[in-house]
Amino acid sequence: MPTLPEDFDPVPGMAETVGDGVRRIVAPNPSPMTWRGTNTYLVGHGDLAVIDPGPDSAAHLDAILAAVGPGQRITRIVVTHAHIDHSPLARPLAAATGAPVLAFGDAQAGRSAVMTQLAEAGLAGGGEGVDTAFLPDHRLAEGDEISGEGWSLRVVHTPGHMGNHIALALGNALFTADHVMGWASSLVSPPDGDLTDFMASCRRLRAQDWRVFYPGHGAAVTDPGGRLDWLIAHREGREAEILSALSRGPATARALAEAIYTETPKALLGAAERNVFAHLVDLTGRERVRPSPALSAGAVFALT
């Protein structure tokens, strides 16, 4: 189901038309977490919205500004979530254009109660890195409309990958950022990522009829329903593996990761452990497992 690497090999900094009134510029920040780089989208023909300006990169800022043609101007900068590969360039772009920065909130906005407790207990984020300094000019909420000449984006709050994560609907097309991608499953790393919220967001999106997903990394997803089915089944399969392993006795998240991710390089085992822990937090909330002595990344988990 994931898009093969050779199927998506864009030129960084080049504005490419991917839909009616939609252009994509890939930032020069390839990595195991970002694939070819962060996708920045320009929406509109006159007034332009920029979705996810991307990392702090002077070259990418120049590329975005160069894509603004005669008679065009950037009027809105929308950040889907406060990870360092999506949000840091928002402020320099705002300074260059005068456009306001819009987002659900700062890096902690939308965080669930259990993740707030874990963070207060000292659990630090992992994975892509959090832009702790990010603060929008205007906060967005579920159902808000962001409009310009000939276009309107509807805000869909999709917590899971991060509490402040939003998607943006342009008719029956959806900019899914890091919630749904074609090349890999979304990272869910507590306390910033919440698997309970992630699965709820997936099922909510699945209940609607989408034509295409424009993700934060990788190529457009042309079978949105099929991709969501894969993501849900993938997570349910991982959960079954964790429960099966725990049926042989209590274990930590680290021990479970080592038992389940047998083909994962050691360098990525930390991310695998955090992924298992995300499942264990969800299973604890559903009373399928019990942590000892208390819920934490180092707890020993047993079936209830």
Image: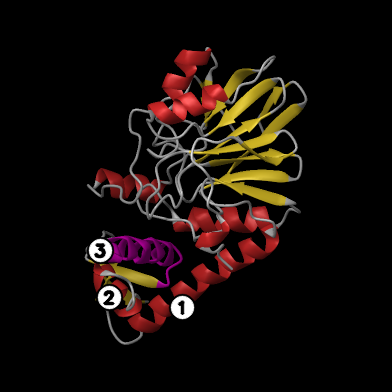
Q: Residues within 10 Å of mark 2 (few under 14, many from 20)?
A: some
The spot of residue 192 in percent (x, y) is 38, 47
Relative vertical location of residue 286 with respect to residue 177 in this rendering, above or below? below
Q: Residues within 10 Å of mark 1 (few under 14, many from 20)?
A: few
The residue under label 1 is which amino acid type?
Ala
In primary-sequence order, the first of circles 1 and 2 is 1
The N terminus, quarter of image: bottom right
What residue would you read off at disc 3? 267
Furthest residue to the bottom?
A: 248
Q: From the viewer's perspective, is the residue at label 2 or at label 3 nearer? A: 3
Quick one: SS at disc 3? helix
Cβ atoms at labels 1 and 3 below 8 Å apart? no
Q: Residue at x 54, y 47 (%)?
A: 10
The spot of residue 108 in percent (x, y) is 39, 37
Q: From the viewer's perspective, is the residue at label 1 or at label 2 nearer? A: 2
Q: Residue at x 50, y 53 (%)?
A: 197
The disc placed on residue 71 is: none
The stretch drawn in magenta includes residue 278: yes
The residue under label 3 is which amino acid type?
Ala
The residue under label 2 is which amino acid type?
Glu
Q: Residues within 10 Å of mark 3 (few under 14, many from 20)?
A: few
Question: Alpha-carbon distance for marks 2 and 3?
Answer: 12 Å
What residue would you read off at disc 1? 240
Answer with left or right where residue 73 lies relative to residue 188: right
Q: Main secondary structure of the magenta part?
A: helix
Bounds of the magenta segment: 268-288
What residue would you read off at disc 2? 258
In primary-sequence order, the first of circles 2 and 3 is 2
